[in-house]
Image (tube, rainbow, N blue to C red):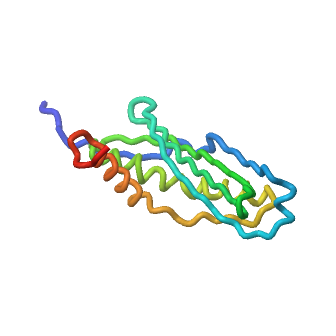
Amino acid sequence: MAEDHKPVEKQFSIQKIYTKDLSFETPNSPKIFTEKWEPKVDFNLGTNVQALDNSLYEVTLTITVTVKCGDTTAYLVEVCQAGIYSLAGFSDEEMGPMVGSFCPNILFPYAREVVSDLVAKGGFPQLLLAPVNFDALYAQHLQQLKQQAPGSDSVN
């Protein structure tokens, strides 16, 4: 009997979503609560991917928010939201966007909620992070890698 050589079916599933690490600091409390609230928000985000075994991958999304009033830091919050995903049957070209954009996009609402909760529990006005276009960020990341590649036209 001849074996069927059908293409491997693509399989994706979320195994677990969890908060891996978090930090909330109010270095200038209680004085900051007596000052006029005119916040300046600095928002940074990063992702990391770790292959676990077979088709399992841990994707982490780290969000760091620093809020200042003038030169005084009101608070700093950092959340590392993680997920374990099962990915099978994807080509190498498909895996990049899956772990670099699709998976972080799933994690973002969880991380946004943690940030909002920590800020409110810290006694500050609610902070709602705007949606993030992970597809555009991933494309930008690929463009940066291309420019840094040996033989590229960039000047170091």
State the image coordinates of residue 82 (x, y, percent, origin top left).
Answer: 55, 43
Q: Which residue lies furthest to the front in this view?
A: 156
**Screen quadrant of the C terminus:** top left
Judged left or right of residue 124, residue 45 is left
Q: Say whether residue 23 is visible.
A: yes
Tell me if residue 147 comes above or below residue 131 in the rendering: above
The location of residue 43, given as percent across then percent down, is 58, 57
Q: Which residue is drawn at 78% across and 49% down?
A: 27
- Left or right: 122 as drawn, with respect to 153: right
Given residues 36 and 83, the one toward you in this image is 36
The one of 73 and 48 positioned closer to us in this rendering: 73
Residue drawn 68% across the image and 64% down it: 127
Q: Can residue 10 be seen in this view?
A: no
Residue sitting at 27 percent across and 42 percent down? 149
Name which quarter of the figure residue 3 lies in.
Answer: top left
The residue positioned farthest toward the left in the image shown: 2
**Residue 105 % position (x, y):** 48, 56
Quarter of the picture containing the N terminus is top left
Q: Position of residue 36 (x, y in %)?
A: 80, 70
Q: Is residue 11 left or right of residue 17?
A: left
Question: Does residue 72 lie above or below 51 as drawn?
Answer: below
Q: Quadrant of residue 6?
A: top left
**Residue beneath the point at 39% across and 42% down:** 87
